[in-house]
Image (tube, rainbow, N blue to C red):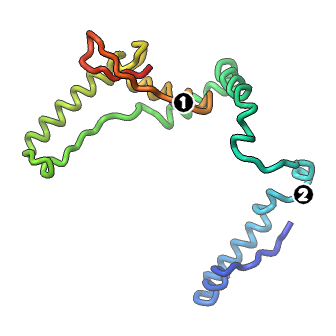
Amino acid sequence: MNLQAQPNLLDRVVGYFAPEWGAARMRARMVMAIAGSWAGASFTRRSLRDWFVTPASADEDTVHDLDTLRARSRDMVRNAPLATGAVNTVVMNVVGTGLSLLPRPDWEALGMTEEQADEWTAQVEREFRVWAESAECDITRTQNFYGLQSLVFRSALESGDAFVLLPMIEGRTNPYALRKP
């Protein structure tokens, strides 16, 4: 392991113009060298001595095992309370209550009065709520827009990716055709 921190060009320039800052940079480099932050590729550490890998792309590293990894991930979430709790915590912290609409038209650029813009905003918010807060936005009619956001993120955590289709399907009870399958 290299415990000697060598100054790079930037360190030398900083040290030339501001010796105190240069010394502080070198102290920080020495601390990092002593802490072993650059020893991840070392073969002298006992924990890394027998760890040999061949560099490959992300696809080459995972594609062959992807089905097994997905199956294990889903199984863990279904059968291990710790994994279930971890996924639930991440979903709640990332998605929370979900994305919501906040329309703010540039009423001057659109040639509207401020009152017209307020009316338009209120109407758009009402119509969005009609769609988003009902199960009509889901093709299976089981979740609303906010539940679907959690479902998509949870699927990405469990399966590694998610692809959402937004088909337009006419319905009798909802004036909007956009649905998430």
Name the residue nearer the viewer: 177 or 132: 177
The numbered disc on residue 162 is 1
Position of residue 139 measured from the top left corner of the image (x, y, whole percent): 40, 16
Name the residue nearer the viewer: 67 or 128: 67
- First-in-chain label (2 vs 1): 2
Quadrant including the C terminus: top left
The numbered disc on residue 104 is none
- Dot 1: few (<14), some (14–19), or many (≥20) neighbours within 10 Å? some
Quadrant including the N terminus: bottom right
- Residue extending furthest bottom? 16
Taking the image as shown, residue 149 lies to the left or right of residue 110, namely: right
Toward which corner of the image does residue 148 lie, by quadrant? top left
Position of residue 126 measured from the top left corner of the image (x, y, whole percent): 21, 27
Name the residue nearer the viewer: 143 or 84: 143
The residue tagged with tag 2: helix, strand or loop? loop
Amino acid type of the residue that numbered disc 2 sits on in the rendered structure: Phe
- Label 2 close to label 1 by CB (< 8 Å): no
Taking the image as shown, residue 160 lies to the left or right of residue 116, namely: right
| Foreground: disc 2 or disc 1 | 1
Q: Residue at x 69, y 20 (%)?
A: 75
Position of residue 11 measured from the top left corner of the image (x, y, whole percent): 66, 80
Image: 170 above or below 83? above
- Judging by the rendered image, the residue that carries numbered circle 2 is 43
Kindly report the distance in space between the C-alpha atoms of the residues bearing marks 2 and 1: 39 Å
Q: Residue at x 13, y 41 (%)?
A: 117
The residue tagged with tag 1: helix, strand or loop? loop
Q: Residue at x 59, y 29 (%)?
A: 87
Position of residue 69 measured from the top left corner of the image (x, y, whole percent): 72, 29
Taking the image as shown, residue 148 lies to the left or right of residue 43, namely: left
Amino acid type of the residue that numbered disc 1 sits on in the rendered structure: Ala
- Dot 2: few (<14), some (14–19), or many (≥20) neighbours within 10 Å? some
